[in-house]
Image: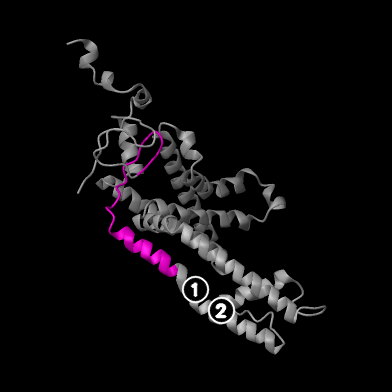
Amino acid sequence: MSASERSPSAKRPQFASQFEGYEDGFRHRMFVVIFEADTRLGRWFDFTLIAAIILSVTVVMLDSIHAVRQQYGSSLSVLEWFFTVLFTLEYIARLACVKQPMKYARSFYGVVDLLAILPTYAAVLMPELHALVDLRLLRLLRMFRLLKLVSYVHEYSMLGQALMASRRKIIIFLSVVAIVVTLNGTLLYLVEGGPGTAFSSIPTAIYFAITSLTTVGFGDIVPQTDVGRAITAFTMLIGWSVLAVPTGIISSEMTAQRFLPRVNTRTCPSCLATGLDGDAKFCKSCGTMLPEYQKEA
């Protein structure tokens, strides 16, 4: 038997050579813990991050209360820096254990991870921001940490899949609603509009039609004629019938998702595609050879 036949790497396709060095070692173990949740350490990592995200958002909320900030401002600042450092280490670890770190940095979750830590550093590194933008906007950006929860909870994925599966129906529904409120607003403008009236333009009348269709009724604009009131009443009745339509569409899709086989969290270290089959040898997205799948009951 030749040396090439004895070498496992000789059987790998050419495009899998970039994967060398990730089958074993610390970086591979760190990748399994951070990106996959089918091991005990992976689940503990996810639970810890979920708790940290919720606590950090709670700190941001408390910091927005003037009385609380006056009394516990220093403690809240320490906690904020603690969570910022924690999320920074997590972000660096994610970049360190993937083959293409810039690809992760440009992904949706990579941008969210960056937005979760950037405001705190920006407020320190660029004091001139006091003159350019209110720092409350930077605090608001820290609420993007809530989006990090999406990558840790399976039910969020189910909701996203249900929305994607029903997107055509929802788009059709929204287009019909847009037509209804446009026609309704135009009629109201013709009946109620004029100089010095609340319905001063068609866009304003459409705004009123939308508030009527959604049965919100802010009361800032009120029809004055009997015909205008009749059109508004008809719009409200239509609202009762159409509001349940998107709920039914999404609910049916979510019900269908329950009967689909649950997708695991196996992730490709090269292209970061997730939900790969447990017995797959190569990534179905990029063709990279995959390491052995690690899963614990």
Q: Position of residue 232 (x, y in %)?
A: 63, 82
135 part of magenta stretch: no
- Residue 153 vs 27, above or below: the answer is below
Can you name the residue that lies furthest to the bottom here? 226
Can you name the residue that lies furthest to the right here? 195
Query: What amino acid is at disc 2?
Result: Thr
Badge 2, how many Cα within 10 Å: few under 14, some, many 20+?
some
Label drawn at residue 243? 1
Q: Position of residue 85 (x, y in %)?
A: 47, 45
Left or right: where 206 falls relative to 106: right
- Residue 206 vs 42, above or below: the answer is below
* Colouring method of the image: one colour
Q: Position of residue 76 (x, y in %)?
A: 50, 58
- Secondary structure at badge 1 equals loop
- Magenta part of the protein: which range? 247-274
Q: Position of residue 172 (x, y in %)?
A: 52, 62
Give 120 or 38, whichever is nearer the viewer: 38
Which residue carries the number 2 mark? 215
Give 108 or 61, whichever is nearer the viewer: 108
Q: Residue sitting at 43 percent across and 69 percent down? A: 247
Q: Residue sitting at 75 percent across and 72 percent down? A: 201
Give 247 or 60, whichever is nearer the viewer: 247
Q: Residue sitting at 31 percent across and 30 percent down? A: 289
Can you name the residue that lies furthest to the top here? 2
Q: Are circles 2 and 1 on residues that touch, CB within 8 Å?
A: yes
Which image quarter is the N terminus in? top left
Quarter-of-image position of residue 100: top left
Give the mark, 2 or 1, whose residue is nearer the N terminus: 2
* Res 121 visible: yes
- Secondary structure at badge 2 equals loop
